[in-house]
Image (tube, grey):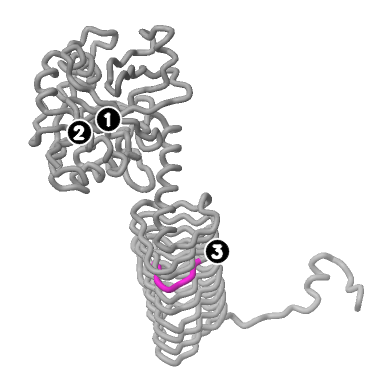
Amino acid sequence: MDISVIILAAGKGTRMKSGLPKVLHPISGLPMIHYIIETAQKVTDDITVVLFHEAERIKKEISDSFDGIAFKIQDHANYPGTGGALMDAKTAHSSVLVLNGDMPLVTFESLKPVLSKKGDIVMTVFDLPDPSGYGRVIIENNEVKAIVEEKDCSAKQRDVKTVNAGVYLFKKEILEFYLPKLSNKNAQAEYYLTDIIKLARKDGKKIVPVWVEKESFKGINSRFDLAKAEEIMQDRIKERWMREGVTMHLPSTIYIDSTVVFEGECTIDSGVNIYGNSVVSNSHIKSHTVIEDAQIKNSSCGPMARIRPGSIISNTHIGNFVEVKKSRLTGIKVGHLSYLGDAEIDEGTNIGAGTITCNYDGIRKHKTKIGKNVFIGSDTQLIAPVTIKDDVMVAAGTTVTKDIEKGSLAISRVEQKIVKNFFYRFFKKGDKNG
Protein backbone atom coordinates (compact mmCIF):
# COMPACT_ATOMS: atom_id res chain seq x y z
CA MET A 1 0.00 0.00 0.00
CA ASP A 2 1.17 3.54 -0.81
CA ILE A 3 0.45 4.64 2.77
CA SER A 4 2.59 5.96 5.60
CA VAL A 5 1.49 5.74 9.24
CA ILE A 6 1.94 8.37 11.93
CA ILE A 7 1.14 7.30 15.52
CA LEU A 8 0.40 10.08 17.99
CA ALA A 9 1.93 9.29 21.39
CA ALA A 10 3.08 12.64 22.75
CA GLY A 11 0.44 13.29 25.40
CA LYS A 12 0.97 13.29 29.17
CA GLY A 13 -2.02 11.08 29.95
CA THR A 14 -2.67 12.91 33.22
CA ARG A 15 -6.01 11.16 33.73
CA MET A 16 -4.14 7.88 34.20
CA LYS A 17 -2.74 9.38 37.45
CA SER A 18 0.50 7.46 37.01
CA GLY A 19 4.24 8.01 36.69
CA LEU A 20 4.21 5.49 33.83
CA PRO A 21 3.60 7.08 30.41
CA LYS A 22 0.08 6.29 29.27
CA VAL A 23 1.07 4.40 26.12
CA LEU A 24 3.33 2.09 28.17
CA HIS A 25 0.55 0.90 30.45
CA PRO A 26 0.26 -2.86 29.83
CA ILE A 27 -2.74 -4.64 28.41
CA SER A 28 -2.55 -8.43 28.53
CA GLY A 29 1.19 -8.43 28.99
CA LEU A 30 2.31 -5.77 26.50
CA PRO A 31 2.43 -1.96 26.51
CA MET A 32 -0.68 -0.65 24.76
CA ILE A 33 1.37 1.07 22.05
CA HIS A 34 2.83 -2.32 21.10
CA TYR A 35 -0.53 -3.38 19.68
CA ILE A 36 -1.01 -0.31 17.52
CA ILE A 37 2.52 -0.65 16.09
CA GLU A 38 1.83 -4.29 15.23
CA THR A 39 -1.31 -3.16 13.42
CA ALA A 40 0.57 -0.38 11.63
CA GLN A 41 3.19 -2.88 10.40
CA LYS A 42 0.43 -4.72 8.55
CA VAL A 43 -0.31 -1.49 6.67
CA THR A 44 3.17 -0.18 5.81
CA ASP A 45 6.90 -0.22 6.45
CA ASP A 46 6.95 3.57 6.89
CA ILE A 47 5.90 4.20 10.50
CA THR A 48 6.62 7.32 12.55
CA VAL A 49 5.80 7.64 16.26
CA VAL A 50 5.38 11.20 17.55
CA LEU A 51 6.66 11.62 21.12
CA PHE A 52 7.11 14.38 23.70
CA HIS A 53 6.30 13.45 27.32
CA GLU A 54 8.80 10.79 28.54
CA ALA A 55 10.03 10.54 24.95
CA GLU A 56 13.27 8.66 25.61
CA ARG A 57 11.58 6.12 27.88
CA ILE A 58 8.90 5.35 25.29
CA LYS A 59 11.41 5.32 22.44
CA LYS A 60 13.56 2.74 24.22
CA GLU A 61 10.58 0.49 24.93
CA ILE A 62 9.53 0.58 21.28
CA SER A 63 13.07 0.17 19.90
CA ASP A 64 13.66 -2.87 22.11
CA SER A 65 10.70 -4.61 20.45
CA PHE A 66 10.56 -3.25 16.89
CA ASP A 67 13.00 -2.45 14.10
CA GLY A 68 12.61 0.29 11.53
CA ILE A 69 10.38 2.64 13.51
CA ALA A 70 11.05 6.36 13.01
CA PHE A 71 10.54 8.87 15.82
CA LYS A 72 9.60 12.54 15.83
CA ILE A 73 9.80 14.71 18.95
CA GLN A 74 6.95 17.20 18.96
CA ASP A 75 7.89 20.87 19.33
CA HIS A 76 5.43 21.17 22.16
CA ALA A 77 6.56 24.64 23.24
CA ASN A 78 5.69 26.16 19.87
CA TYR A 79 3.19 23.71 18.41
CA PRO A 80 1.14 21.93 21.08
CA GLY A 81 -1.90 19.82 20.21
CA THR A 82 -2.73 17.06 17.76
CA GLY A 83 -2.19 19.30 14.76
CA GLY A 84 1.13 20.46 16.17
CA ALA A 85 2.21 16.82 16.50
CA LEU A 86 2.13 16.46 12.71
CA MET A 87 4.09 19.63 11.95
CA ASP A 88 7.17 18.80 9.84
CA ALA A 89 6.53 15.03 10.04
CA LYS A 90 8.36 13.26 7.21
CA THR A 91 6.52 10.50 5.33
CA ALA A 92 7.44 8.44 2.28
CA HIS A 93 4.09 7.70 0.67
CA SER A 94 1.24 9.59 -0.98
CA SER A 95 -1.29 8.95 1.82
CA VAL A 96 -0.90 9.25 5.58
CA LEU A 97 -2.87 7.18 8.09
CA VAL A 98 -2.98 8.89 11.50
CA LEU A 99 -3.41 6.51 14.44
CA ASN A 100 -3.31 7.03 18.19
CA GLY A 101 -0.93 5.30 20.58
CA ASP A 102 -3.71 4.92 23.15
CA MET A 103 -5.98 2.89 20.84
CA PRO A 104 -4.63 -0.65 21.36
CA LEU A 105 -7.79 -2.38 20.12
CA VAL A 106 -7.56 -1.14 16.52
CA THR A 107 -6.89 -4.08 14.20
CA PHE A 108 -5.90 -4.33 10.56
CA GLU A 109 -9.32 -5.81 9.80
CA SER A 110 -11.05 -2.82 11.40
CA LEU A 111 -8.90 -0.46 9.29
CA LYS A 112 -9.64 -2.10 5.94
CA PRO A 113 -12.80 -0.03 5.28
CA VAL A 114 -10.77 3.13 5.96
CA LEU A 115 -7.91 2.11 3.69
CA SER A 116 -10.26 1.19 0.84
CA LYS A 117 -12.13 4.53 0.72
CA LYS A 118 -11.26 7.27 -1.75
CA GLY A 119 -11.24 10.90 -0.71
CA ASP A 120 -9.02 13.82 0.13
CA ILE A 121 -9.64 12.92 3.77
CA VAL A 122 -11.18 9.75 5.16
CA MET A 123 -12.25 9.97 8.79
CA THR A 124 -13.67 7.39 11.16
CA VAL A 125 -16.95 7.93 12.98
CA PHE A 126 -19.30 5.91 15.14
CA ASP A 127 -22.78 6.41 16.52
CA LEU A 128 -23.48 6.67 20.24
CA PRO A 129 -26.90 6.35 21.89
CA ASP A 130 -25.80 9.18 24.20
CA PRO A 131 -23.12 11.35 22.57
CA SER A 132 -22.91 13.78 25.49
CA GLY A 133 -19.39 15.16 25.86
CA TYR A 134 -18.43 14.45 22.25
CA GLY A 135 -18.20 16.79 19.31
CA ARG A 136 -20.78 15.95 16.62
CA VAL A 137 -19.88 15.01 13.05
CA ILE A 138 -22.37 16.52 10.61
CA ILE A 139 -22.73 14.31 7.53
CA GLU A 140 -24.73 15.03 4.36
CA ASN A 141 -24.79 12.95 1.17
CA ASN A 142 -22.11 10.68 2.64
CA GLU A 143 -19.65 13.53 3.09
CA VAL A 144 -18.51 15.25 6.26
CA LYS A 145 -19.79 18.81 6.35
CA ALA A 146 -18.49 19.81 9.77
CA ILE A 147 -17.22 18.72 13.17
CA VAL A 148 -19.00 20.79 15.81
CA GLU A 149 -17.88 20.87 19.44
CA GLU A 150 -20.74 20.10 21.82
CA LYS A 151 -20.70 23.55 23.39
CA ASP A 152 -21.14 25.05 19.91
CA CYS A 153 -23.96 22.72 18.79
CA SER A 154 -27.40 24.03 17.87
CA ALA A 155 -30.41 22.24 19.34
CA LYS A 156 -30.74 20.23 16.11
CA GLN A 157 -27.05 19.35 16.07
CA ARG A 158 -27.22 18.09 19.65
CA ASP A 159 -29.59 15.37 18.41
CA VAL A 160 -26.88 14.03 16.09
CA LYS A 161 -25.51 10.71 17.38
CA THR A 162 -22.44 10.53 15.12
CA VAL A 163 -19.09 11.38 16.72
CA ASN A 164 -15.43 11.41 15.71
CA ALA A 165 -13.55 8.11 16.23
CA GLY A 166 -10.15 9.80 15.91
CA VAL A 167 -8.44 7.90 13.06
CA TYR A 168 -7.82 9.64 9.72
CA LEU A 169 -6.45 8.88 6.27
CA PHE A 170 -5.11 12.03 4.57
CA LYS A 171 -3.73 12.59 1.15
CA LYS A 172 -0.20 13.76 1.80
CA GLU A 173 -0.69 17.01 -0.08
CA ILE A 174 -3.67 17.84 2.12
CA LEU A 175 -1.48 17.73 5.23
CA GLU A 176 1.32 19.65 3.54
CA PHE A 177 -1.07 22.39 2.44
CA TYR A 178 -3.26 22.78 5.55
CA LEU A 179 -0.90 22.14 8.47
CA PRO A 180 0.83 25.53 8.01
CA LYS A 181 -2.60 27.18 7.98
CA LEU A 182 -3.63 25.90 11.42
CA SER A 183 -4.15 28.43 14.19
CA ASN A 184 -3.93 28.06 17.95
CA LYS A 185 -6.41 30.86 18.66
CA ASN A 186 -8.69 28.76 20.87
CA ALA A 187 -9.34 28.17 24.55
CA GLN A 188 -6.50 25.64 24.86
CA ALA A 189 -4.06 27.59 22.66
CA GLU A 190 -3.36 24.37 20.74
CA TYR A 191 -3.20 23.36 17.09
CA TYR A 192 -6.03 20.91 16.40
CA LEU A 193 -5.93 18.22 13.74
CA THR A 194 -9.70 18.49 13.41
CA ASP A 195 -9.30 22.06 12.16
CA ILE A 196 -7.87 20.63 8.95
CA ILE A 197 -11.29 19.10 8.32
CA LYS A 198 -12.87 22.55 8.67
CA LEU A 199 -10.34 24.22 6.36
CA ALA A 200 -10.51 21.48 3.74
CA ARG A 201 -14.29 21.53 3.79
CA LYS A 202 -14.34 25.28 3.09
CA ASP A 203 -12.21 24.61 0.03
CA GLY A 204 -14.59 21.94 -1.23
CA LYS A 205 -12.32 18.96 -0.55
CA LYS A 206 -13.92 15.53 -0.35
CA ILE A 207 -14.13 14.31 3.24
CA VAL A 208 -15.49 10.76 3.45
CA PRO A 209 -16.84 9.26 6.69
CA VAL A 210 -16.38 5.59 7.57
CA TRP A 211 -18.54 4.11 10.32
CA VAL A 212 -16.50 1.85 12.61
CA GLU A 213 -17.20 -0.21 15.72
CA LYS A 214 -16.61 1.70 18.94
CA GLU A 215 -15.06 -1.37 20.58
CA SER A 216 -12.10 -1.40 18.17
CA PHE A 217 -11.54 2.36 18.24
CA LYS A 218 -11.79 2.76 21.99
CA GLY A 219 -9.28 5.25 23.40
CA ILE A 220 -7.64 4.77 26.80
CA ASN A 221 -7.76 7.81 29.06
CA SER A 222 -8.18 6.36 32.56
CA ARG A 223 -7.58 3.21 34.61
CA PHE A 224 -11.25 2.38 34.06
CA ASP A 225 -10.77 2.57 30.27
CA LEU A 226 -7.66 0.41 30.66
CA ALA A 227 -9.60 -2.27 32.53
CA LYS A 228 -12.39 -2.29 29.94
CA ALA A 229 -9.87 -2.53 27.10
CA GLU A 230 -8.18 -5.47 28.79
CA GLU A 231 -11.51 -7.28 29.05
CA ILE A 232 -11.96 -6.88 25.31
CA MET A 233 -8.37 -7.96 24.61
CA GLN A 234 -8.78 -11.00 26.85
CA ASP A 235 -11.93 -12.03 24.97
CA ARG A 236 -10.03 -11.77 21.68
CA ILE A 237 -7.05 -13.76 22.97
CA LYS A 238 -9.18 -16.57 24.39
CA GLU A 239 -11.46 -16.73 21.35
CA ARG A 240 -8.41 -17.07 19.11
CA TRP A 241 -7.00 -19.99 21.09
CA MET A 242 -10.34 -21.75 21.51
CA ARG A 243 -10.77 -21.59 17.74
CA GLU A 244 -7.31 -23.17 17.51
CA GLY A 245 -8.52 -26.12 19.60
CA VAL A 246 -7.79 -25.13 23.21
CA THR A 247 -10.53 -26.11 25.67
CA MET A 248 -11.29 -23.47 28.31
CA HIS A 249 -13.66 -24.03 31.21
CA LEU A 250 -15.39 -20.79 32.27
CA PRO A 251 -13.13 -18.67 30.06
CA SER A 252 -14.32 -15.43 31.68
CA THR A 253 -12.39 -16.47 34.82
CA ILE A 254 -9.14 -17.20 32.93
CA TYR A 255 -6.35 -14.68 32.26
CA ILE A 256 -3.88 -15.23 29.38
CA ASP A 257 -1.18 -12.80 28.24
CA SER A 258 -1.09 -12.02 24.54
CA THR A 259 2.45 -13.45 24.40
CA VAL A 260 1.42 -16.94 25.59
CA VAL A 261 1.49 -19.79 23.04
CA PHE A 262 -0.54 -23.00 23.04
CA GLU A 263 0.37 -26.07 21.01
CA GLY A 264 -1.66 -29.22 20.37
CA GLU A 265 -4.64 -30.14 22.53
CA CYS A 266 -4.70 -28.23 25.79
CA THR A 267 -7.31 -27.88 28.53
CA ILE A 268 -7.38 -24.80 30.74
CA ASP A 269 -9.62 -24.91 33.81
CA SER A 270 -11.30 -22.00 35.55
CA GLY A 271 -9.29 -19.37 37.40
CA VAL A 272 -5.99 -20.11 35.62
CA ASN A 273 -3.52 -17.25 35.00
CA ILE A 274 -0.77 -17.64 32.37
CA TYR A 275 1.78 -14.87 31.89
CA GLY A 276 4.75 -13.82 29.76
CA ASN A 277 6.35 -16.00 27.12
CA SER A 278 4.88 -19.23 28.43
CA VAL A 279 4.36 -22.16 26.05
CA VAL A 280 1.80 -24.82 26.92
CA SER A 281 1.77 -27.98 24.76
CA ASN A 282 -0.69 -30.89 25.00
CA SER A 283 -1.23 -30.23 28.69
CA HIS A 284 -3.97 -29.81 31.27
CA ILE A 285 -3.70 -26.73 33.48
CA LYS A 286 -6.05 -27.19 36.41
CA SER A 287 -8.04 -24.63 38.37
CA HIS A 288 -6.36 -21.57 39.88
CA THR A 289 -2.87 -22.46 38.71
CA VAL A 290 -0.45 -19.61 37.91
CA ILE A 291 2.20 -20.02 35.18
CA GLU A 292 4.85 -17.37 34.50
CA ASP A 293 7.35 -17.52 31.62
CA ALA A 294 7.49 -21.32 31.70
CA GLN A 295 7.26 -24.24 29.28
CA ILE A 296 4.75 -27.01 29.98
CA LYS A 297 4.64 -30.05 27.69
CA ASN A 298 2.57 -33.24 27.93
CA SER A 299 1.90 -32.52 31.60
CA SER A 300 -0.77 -31.64 34.12
CA CYS A 301 -0.40 -28.81 36.61
CA GLY A 302 -2.56 -28.03 39.61
CA PRO A 303 -5.02 -27.30 40.91
CA MET A 304 -3.56 -24.30 42.71
CA ALA A 305 0.02 -24.82 41.56
CA ARG A 306 2.49 -22.06 40.81
CA ILE A 307 5.01 -22.46 38.02
CA ARG A 308 7.50 -19.62 38.12
CA PRO A 309 9.85 -18.22 35.44
CA GLY A 310 12.49 -20.41 33.88
CA SER A 311 10.72 -23.71 34.55
CA ILE A 312 10.66 -26.40 31.87
CA ILE A 313 8.22 -29.21 32.65
CA SER A 314 7.57 -32.22 30.43
CA ASN A 315 5.69 -35.52 30.87
CA THR A 316 5.15 -34.57 34.49
CA HIS A 317 2.34 -34.43 37.03
CA ILE A 318 2.35 -31.32 39.23
CA GLY A 319 -0.25 -31.53 41.99
CA ASN A 320 -1.99 -29.01 44.20
CA PHE A 321 -0.05 -26.42 46.21
CA VAL A 322 3.21 -27.20 44.42
CA GLU A 323 5.58 -24.36 43.54
CA VAL A 324 8.26 -24.79 40.87
CA LYS A 325 10.90 -22.16 40.14
CA LYS A 326 13.59 -22.24 37.44
CA SER A 327 13.62 -26.04 37.35
CA ARG A 328 13.69 -28.71 34.67
CA LEU A 329 11.34 -31.58 35.51
CA THR A 330 11.17 -34.54 33.13
CA GLY A 331 8.75 -37.41 33.63
CA ILE A 332 8.25 -37.03 37.38
CA LYS A 333 5.40 -36.87 39.90
CA VAL A 334 5.13 -34.24 42.60
CA GLY A 335 1.70 -34.62 44.09
CA HIS A 336 1.29 -31.80 46.55
CA LEU A 337 2.67 -29.32 49.04
CA SER A 338 6.23 -29.07 47.72
CA TYR A 339 8.72 -26.42 46.61
CA LEU A 340 11.19 -27.24 43.84
CA GLY A 341 13.57 -24.38 43.04
CA ASP A 342 16.71 -24.42 40.86
CA ALA A 343 16.36 -28.18 40.40
CA GLU A 344 16.89 -30.77 37.68
CA ILE A 345 14.86 -33.94 38.23
CA ASP A 346 14.78 -36.88 35.82
CA GLU A 347 12.13 -39.39 34.78
CA GLY A 348 10.52 -41.94 37.05
CA THR A 349 11.16 -39.90 40.20
CA ASN A 350 8.47 -39.34 42.82
CA ILE A 351 8.58 -36.32 45.11
CA GLY A 352 6.74 -36.80 48.40
CA ALA A 353 4.50 -34.20 50.04
CA GLY A 354 6.29 -31.43 51.90
CA THR A 355 9.59 -31.81 50.04
CA ILE A 356 11.64 -28.63 49.77
CA THR A 357 14.78 -27.82 47.83
CA CYS A 358 16.67 -25.42 50.07
CA ASN A 359 18.27 -23.53 47.20
CA TYR A 360 19.25 -20.24 48.83
CA ASP A 361 22.03 -19.87 51.40
CA GLY A 362 21.35 -16.20 52.06
CA ILE A 363 23.85 -15.03 49.41
CA ARG A 364 23.61 -17.33 46.37
CA LYS A 365 21.19 -19.78 44.75
CA HIS A 366 22.35 -23.41 44.37
CA LYS A 367 21.18 -26.34 42.27
CA THR A 368 19.65 -29.64 43.26
CA LYS A 369 20.11 -32.54 40.81
CA ILE A 370 18.04 -35.70 41.14
CA GLY A 371 18.42 -38.65 38.78
CA LYS A 372 16.02 -41.31 37.50
CA ASN A 373 13.71 -43.54 39.53
CA VAL A 374 14.35 -41.74 42.80
CA PHE A 375 11.86 -41.93 45.66
CA ILE A 376 11.85 -38.86 47.89
CA GLY A 377 9.86 -39.41 51.06
CA SER A 378 7.53 -36.81 52.55
CA ASP A 379 8.85 -33.85 54.50
CA THR A 380 12.35 -34.07 53.04
CA GLN A 381 14.70 -31.10 52.90
CA LEU A 382 17.33 -31.11 50.16
CA ILE A 383 20.14 -28.69 51.09
CA ALA A 384 21.63 -27.44 47.82
CA PRO A 385 24.04 -27.83 46.22
CA VAL A 386 23.37 -31.56 46.26
CA THR A 387 23.21 -34.40 43.74
CA ILE A 388 21.14 -37.57 44.12
CA LYS A 389 22.00 -40.28 41.61
CA ASP A 390 19.60 -42.81 40.00
CA ASP A 391 17.66 -45.49 41.92
CA VAL A 392 17.88 -43.82 45.32
CA MET A 393 15.41 -43.85 48.20
CA VAL A 394 15.27 -40.97 50.66
CA ALA A 395 13.32 -41.74 53.80
CA ALA A 396 10.54 -39.42 54.97
CA GLY A 397 11.69 -36.61 57.23
CA THR A 398 15.29 -36.73 56.02
CA THR A 399 17.51 -33.67 55.69
CA VAL A 400 19.89 -34.34 52.80
CA THR A 401 23.18 -32.45 53.09
CA LYS A 402 25.50 -34.71 51.05
CA ASP A 403 25.44 -36.29 47.60
CA ILE A 404 23.84 -39.76 47.45
CA GLU A 405 25.27 -42.53 45.29
CA LYS A 406 23.23 -44.70 42.95
CA GLY A 407 21.11 -47.44 44.56
CA SER A 408 21.42 -46.08 48.10
CA LEU A 409 19.01 -45.33 50.92
CA ALA A 410 19.42 -42.03 52.72
CA ILE A 411 17.91 -41.58 56.16
CA SER A 412 18.61 -39.02 58.84
CA ARG A 413 16.35 -39.17 61.86
CA VAL A 414 17.02 -38.95 65.55
CA GLU A 415 16.03 -42.06 67.42
CA GLN A 416 12.42 -41.88 68.54
CA LYS A 417 12.09 -41.50 72.29
CA ILE A 418 8.94 -42.34 74.24
CA VAL A 419 8.42 -41.06 77.76
CA LYS A 420 5.61 -43.05 79.35
CA ASN A 421 2.84 -41.16 81.20
CA PHE A 422 4.41 -37.79 80.38
CA PHE A 423 1.03 -36.29 79.43
CA TYR A 424 -0.46 -36.99 82.85
CA ARG A 425 2.56 -35.66 84.72
CA PHE A 426 2.71 -32.51 82.62
CA PHE A 427 -0.94 -31.63 83.05
CA LYS A 428 -1.04 -33.07 86.59
CA LYS A 429 -3.87 -35.38 85.67
CA GLY A 430 -4.29 -39.02 86.57
CA ASP A 431 -4.66 -41.73 83.95
CA LYS A 432 -8.37 -42.26 83.99
CA ASN A 433 -7.95 -45.61 82.25
CA GLY A 434 -5.01 -46.73 84.41
First in sequence, mark 1 or 2: give its number.
Answer: 2
As drawn, the label of residue 167 is 1
Q: Which of pointers 2 and 3 indicates the residue nearer the eye?
A: 2
For marks 1 and 2, give the CA distance.
7 Å
First in sequence, mark 2 or 3: give its number.
Answer: 2
Query: In terms of image quadrants, where is residue 51?
Result: top left
Residue at the spot 41% in from the left edge and 85% down from the top edge? 372
Magenta portion: prevailing SS class = strand
Residue at the spot 54% in from the left edge and 76% down from the top edge? 352
User: On the image, numbered disc 2 is attached to which residue?
Assistant: 97
Circle count: 3
**Residue furthest bottom in the image:** 407
User: On the image, numbered disc 3 is attached to which residue?
Assistant: 303
Q: Residues within 10 Å of mark 3 (few under 14, many from 20)?
A: many
Query: In terms of image quadrants, where is residue 46?
Result: top left
Label 1, secondary structure: give it.
strand
Q: Is residue 415 above or below residue 81?
A: below
> Which amino acid, by three-letter code, is at mark 2?
Leu
> Percent x, y for residue 153?
38, 9
Badge 1 vs badge 2, beta-carbon distance below 8 Å: yes
First in sequence, mark 1 or 3: give its number.
Answer: 1
Magenta residues (range):
296-301
For marks 1 and 3, give the CA distance.
45 Å
Q: Which of pointers 1 and 3 indicates the residue nearer the eye?
A: 1
Q: Is residue 192 left or right of residue 130?
A: left
> Which amino acid, by three-letter code, is at mark 1?
Val
